[in-house]
Amino acid sequence: MNPSLLMTVYVDETDMCGEIPLYEAIVRRLLHHSIAGATVMPGTMGYGRHGRVHHKRLFGVSDDRPMAIFAVDQESKIRAILPEIRAMVQEGLVTVAPVEVA
């Protein structure tokens, strides 16, 4: 079995890449590079290095929710796309961790 990695990318809901949301641009790049799987999940609440709390407000309106993009594939494929993803993320965080795929 080939070693697998989980890449997690943390961005804000309002971060953009040209005309589309950054999280969508990242998922499209992952798909273009045939990464095995990717999922975007909105965060209910969170904060980053600036210490500003992001969360859902009254009536479910967001003040810029955190978003997490999870991608899993073989280590070689994740490492190959990692520089491109890092270049796309200006304010967020990118983490990589080994995972066991069952």
Image: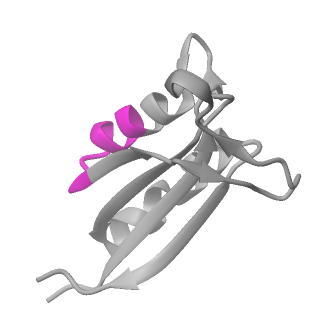
Q: Is residue 7 left or right of residue 37?
A: right
Residue 47, position as x, y percentages in the image: 73, 55
Question: Looking at the image, which is closer to me, 49 or 3?
Answer: 49
Q: In the figure, is residue 92 to the left or right of 81?
A: right
User: Residue at 45% of width from left, 61% of height from top?
Assistant: 80
Residue 61 visible within the image: no
- Quarter-wise, where is residue 5 in the image? bottom left
Q: Quadrant of the N terminus?
A: bottom left
Query: In the visual, does 40 lie left or right of 12?
Result: left
x and y percent of residue 2 in the render? 21, 85
**Which residue occupies 56% across, 47% down?**
84
Q: Which residues are magenta?
A: 27-37
Quadrant containing the C terminus in the rendered view: bottom left
32 vs 80, left or right, is left
Residue sitting farthest toward the right: 50
Please, which residue is most extreme toward the top here? 19
Residue at image location 40% in from the left, 37% down from the top: 29
Residue 83 in view here: yes
Percent coordinates x, y for residue 70 in the rendering: 39, 57
Whether residue 25 is situated above or below residue 77 in the rendered picture: above
Q: Residue furthest front?
A: 58
Position of residue 69 measured from the top left corner of the image (x, y, whole percent): 44, 50
Can residue 9 be found in the magenta stretch?
A: no
Query: Which colour scheme appears in the figure?
Result: one colour
Q: Who's the residue at 24% across and 47% down the image?
A: 34
Location of residue 95 by image quarter: bottom right
